Image (spheres, coloured by chain):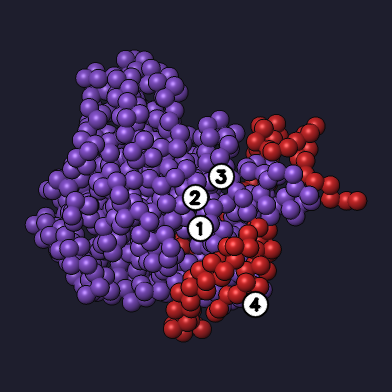
Chain colours: A purple, B red
Amino acid sequence: MHKDTIAQMRQNLKSGAYSSVELCETFLQRIESSNPALNAFISVMGESAMDQARAADKRLASGDNAALLGVPIAHKDIFCTEGVRTSCGSRMLENFAPPYNATVVSKLDAAGVVCLGKTNMDEFAMGSSNENSYFGPVANPWNTAHVPGGSSGGSAAAVAARLVPGCTGTDTGGSIRQPAAFCGITGIKPTYGRVSRYGMIAFASSLDQAGPMATSAEDCALMLDAMAGFDERDSTSIDEPVDDYSVGLDKPLDGLKIGLPKQYFTQDLAAPIAASLQAAIAEYEKLGVTFVDIELKNQHLAVPAYYVVAPAECSSNLSRFDGVRYGYRCEDPVDLEDLYKRSRGEGFGREVKRRILIGTYALSAGYYDAYYIKAQKIRNLISQDFTDAFKEVDMILGPTTPTPAFSLGEKTSDPVAMYLNDIYTIPANLAGLPGISLPCGTIDGLPVGLQLVGNYFSEQRLLNAAHRFQQATDWHRQVPADFA
Amino acid sequence: MAVDAKIVAQVAHLARVEIDDASVAGFATEMTNVLDLAGQMDEVDTSQVEPMAHPLHAVQRLRPDVVTESDQREAFQSQAPAVDGGYYLVPQVIE
């Protein structure tokens, strides 16, 4: 039961092969036995999940046709859940129970899901290894001495270990795709503005985007069907028609043209990753895809620009945590300034403080043009590279990450080395483009991820291309031995 | 750009974040490294490039000037560290 896809669960719940109560009990038991080793969940919502499952079973029996009725999922702990602790991986919000739901939560509720809990993450989504969580690091189910990636590390580990079939995630610089790659699952970051950011705790507002993480492209499509759409409560939400993502997954790929950026396939790319990608390219050629070399000549400037834009926006967004209206407050403040400084100093972890400092510096008088405006100009160049590329090709293929999952503790002492993990994922965020990561191999027992980046609002085509690959291969069906 | 302890202290004050003395040197080094990384942007001449304001070049959406939210003060203040009679409590500001 626990290895079924969401697509299979929908059928089995409808046919009565099993009930939502049985399904959720199975997953809650798996969480209970496996979470101590993985630390993928910050909160488990056993009681409310069983209530939801019982209600779902009644609705299923009455012929209710809600798209994900009775299907268990979990939310990254960045999405506000009414009355349920939403920590964002931070001491600052350790006891925060929001008075409202994020739009993503409301929409998935409306589709009938059962929420099993809230998943672990890097504090305020800042990190690429999930080692920055106030609630402790998450282990990679494929090898528990390795990181699951970040910042949606808990979501990726939980799905990979089959503790839940699908999770929500958010992606500011790769936080859905990089952990999906490290954990051997599928995750899509939609076009900026496609999924509402309302109730999703903000990190860098011009980059943040929510998306689904699951074992297959088909399951991501089913979740994205429920999540996507215009929301007037998000001022950057895009009012464009939403495709039916789960329709057209089987469309043949004949005639599809995929670009291979010369800047990605260099000698610097680790040989085993390159080999996995070459095998995937060969598989795609069998499916009728043609490949052409393309240029993305400003790619190497993506990480430098990102580490100005993201900290700058973070320093602005996180100014709301003041120890007054919600969140952590220090003991016995002597005056208002002491209240602000110590509440923030004690409530935020080291990585968050560093980014606030860098962002504050980059936005301060005399430096704004040299850093923030310069970075926004670079962003335009990177975006233009993509626009030019999409005149020639339908999508772009490359690695999701430069290496498979690294060891816990391996990169914590060098922030810049950690930041360079995201060299292949950050460009899509800077340009606002959709990108999907899917498993395409393993190296020493650790998964390798392949990334496809498409033009604006091409989620359906990306999911279609990923789905066809997954019908021809079985990387996405592999389960870590200890969690089979 | 080398960041020293004095700059760390200034920026930490601007951001209203307390940094303990033992961490200042580490933050100075890390900030220097990250700003050096950002410095790589200078290799490209961007004098003729417009800064990007929005990935899809969208402009701020406007809505009719009507009340859309109801008063939920109690719900919001249920999450505040200290309130009294509908007010948020902070240390005394005016002598």
- Give the mark toward the camera: 4 or 3: 3
Q: Are marks 1 and 2 on the same chain?
A: yes
Check whether the beta carbons of the residues at disc 1 and disc 2 lie within 8 A of each other: yes
Q: Are marks 3 and 1 on the same chain?
A: yes
Residue A457 sits in quarter = bottom left
Counting residues from the start of the chain, the first of labels 2 and 4 encountered is 2
Residue B61 sits in quarter = bottom right
The chain carrying label 3 is A
- Give the mark toward the camera: 2 or 4: 2
**Helix, strand, or loop for circle 1?**
helix
The chain carrying label 4 is A
Q: Are marks 1 and 4 on the same chain?
A: yes
Give the residue type at disc 3: Arg
Q: Nearer the viewer, residue A450 or A267?
A: A267
Task: Provide residue B18's location: percent of width, then percent of height.
Answer: 66, 58
Q: Residue at x 31, y 55 (%)?
A: A407
Indicate left or right for A477 with A84 as reference.
left
Q: Is residue A400 above or below residue A122?
A: below
Q: Residue at x 40, y 30 (%)?
A: A116
Counting residues from the start of the chain, the first of labels 4 and 3 encountered is 3
| Callout 4 crowding tier (Cα within 10 Å): few <14, some 14–19, many ≥20 | few
Counting residues from the start of the chain, the first of labels 1 and 4 encountered is 1
Residue receiving disc 2: A123
Q: Alpha carbon of mark 1 to alpha carbon of mark 2: how far?
A: 8 Å
Counting residues from the start of the chain, the first of labels 3 and 2 encountered is 3
Q: Residue at x 25, y 73 (%)?
A: A268
Check whether the beta carbons of the residues at disc 3 and disc 1 lie within 8 A of each other: no
Residue receiving disc 1: A351
Check whether the beta carbons of the residues at disc 4 and disc 3 lie within 8 A of each other: no
Residue receiving disc 3: A91
Residue receiving disc 4: A366
